[in-house]
Image: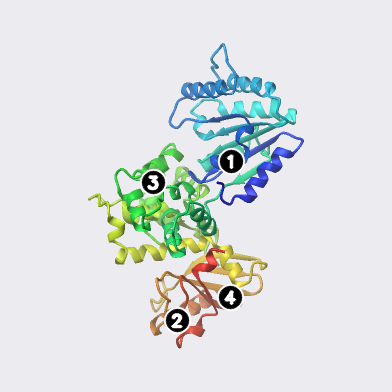
Amino acid sequence: MLIGREPEQQMLLDAYKTKNSEFVAVYGRRRVGKTYLIREVFGAKLTFSHAGLANADKKSQLEAWVDSLKEYGIESSQFPKTWIEAFGLLKELVKKSKSRKKIVFIDEMPWMDTQHSGFVSALEHFWNGWASARKDVLLIVCGSATSWMVNNVIKNHGGLHNRVTVRIHVKPFSLHECEEYVTSRGLSMSRRQIMECYMIMGGVPFYWSFLRKGRSLAQNIDDIFFNPEGNLWGEFDELYASLFKNPERYVTIVTTLASKRAGMTREELLKEGKMPNNGNVTKALSDLEYCGFIRKFSPLGRKERGAVYQLVDFYTLFYFKFIRDNRNVDRHFWTLNQETAQYYAWSGLAFERVCFDHVEQIKAALGIMGVISNVYSWRSKTDSSDGRGAQIDMLIDRRDQVITLCEIKYSKTRFAIDADYDEVLMNKVERFRTETGTKKSVQIVLVTTVGLVQNEYYDDVQNIIEMNNLFE
């Protein structure tokens, strides 16, 4: 059963219905459901389907290609030595098809582009020199190495420049879609449990598929992540190795960023990670951003040079906080660590990331969906004379002359603002006004799980966003 993905399904169907050949590029994070989407939409209508092999050389890739062609009825007397010849065999298959639209699906394409293979040039030749002129080919290319897909297909500066007619970015599920998925599977989970699961796994459907009925969320997490026989026991190494040819640099970057909640500037990252300042680091940062593992933002009032990088991938954050150093292989680790200080430190950060994933839901709850706005994080200058620096989790800079400062607080009960925290809030507003020089109205919004205790400080907050709003 296909959950959500209505816009993506419609884009695929629209491409199928046109009277021209269409070149569709589908990309997104590994295990987000790209292949499943395409197979669910087209199924038996596929004229040809093939998936690249991980960590295989050109010869092995070509052998797999020929094997896929055989499955669809093409036997070759000669084994192709080049990708030009391999695509020539594909042309024969397409010519034999009697379908109105010939659907060619090439999955995990980045793996096929081995060193000096000529794969991209052959793809260019197939599309530009033949398929695009036929008007009856729907070419769908797909890959989890998002940076490769963007640089070599979508933003290609060679023969494929501006050839992609449809771009589909398959993103992780939202909380609403995760709730739909849980319901479809017959899993008994409250919204709080769904949200906590999201804080661990993000909206990656493949990860959610390992949840089992009849087990608590804690038991499921133990089974999936902390059991050496668990489905995702070695996921971290597999994840980065499958996406990047030289994963060490990428792992160094995410490891360094994991140590600082607020993120780091490029200069801070190079220093902390002991990395050279060169183009390899620039490329790695760009690749990680494309793949959705980190986000780059320029704090309000600062130039591009002061851009901050933050680690935002939920699984990676969970790995560094709990899995990496669990050397004793405690199979019940998560069950036994639900109320620890370490758990609450992680949950605050993870909930903050959930809120950034659901900015549109927050804006909808505030009634400002129609207002043009930009979303930032902000931190005050470190050289404040009185030492009272400030950091704002999320701020929404609005065109209606209002800046919304979002305070994000994870709590298992209603959150209470006491005198000390109220002073912290007022200091944040003061610091923000002073350092940015803004003339806009500044409003404080509290984003929490189950609401705010009504006490003498309740009215210092203009709006309250609860967990349920994020599920809309």
Left of 165 or right of it: where is 341?
left
For marks 1 and 4, the one nearer the N-term is: 1
Alpha carbon distance from label 1 to label 4: 50 Å
Q: Percent position (x, y) of residue 95?
A: 69, 22
Q: Percent position (x, y) of residue 23?
A: 66, 36
> Of the residues tagged 2 and 1, which is closer to the observer?
1
Residue 348 falls in which quadrant of the image?
A: bottom left
148 or 38: nearer the viewer: 38
| Res. 444 mark | none
> Of the residues tagged 1 and 4, which is closer to the observer?
1
Residue 78 falls in which quadrant of the image?
A: top right
Q: Percent position (x, y) of residue 307?
A: 50, 58
The single residue placed furthest to the right in the displayed view is 19
Alpha carbon distance from label 3 to label 4: 39 Å
164 or 265: nearer the viewer: 164
Residue on which the image places disc 4: 438
Q: Circles 2 and 4: CB distance less than 8 Å? A: no
| Residue 262 makes an appearance in the image | no
Q: Which residue is drawn at 31% across and 66% down?
A: 339
Residue on which the image places disc 1: 40
> Of the residues tagged 3 and 4, which is closer to the observer?
3
For marks 2 and 3, the one nearer the N-term is: 3
| Res. 251 mark | 3
Identity of the amino acid at label 1? Glu
Alpha carbon distance from label 2 to label 3: 42 Å
Considering the numbered disc 2 on the image, is that residue within a helix, a strand or a loop? loop
Residue on which the image places disc 2: 453
Considering the numbered disc 1 on the image, is that residue within a helix, a strand or a loop? helix
266 or 145: nearer the viewer: 145
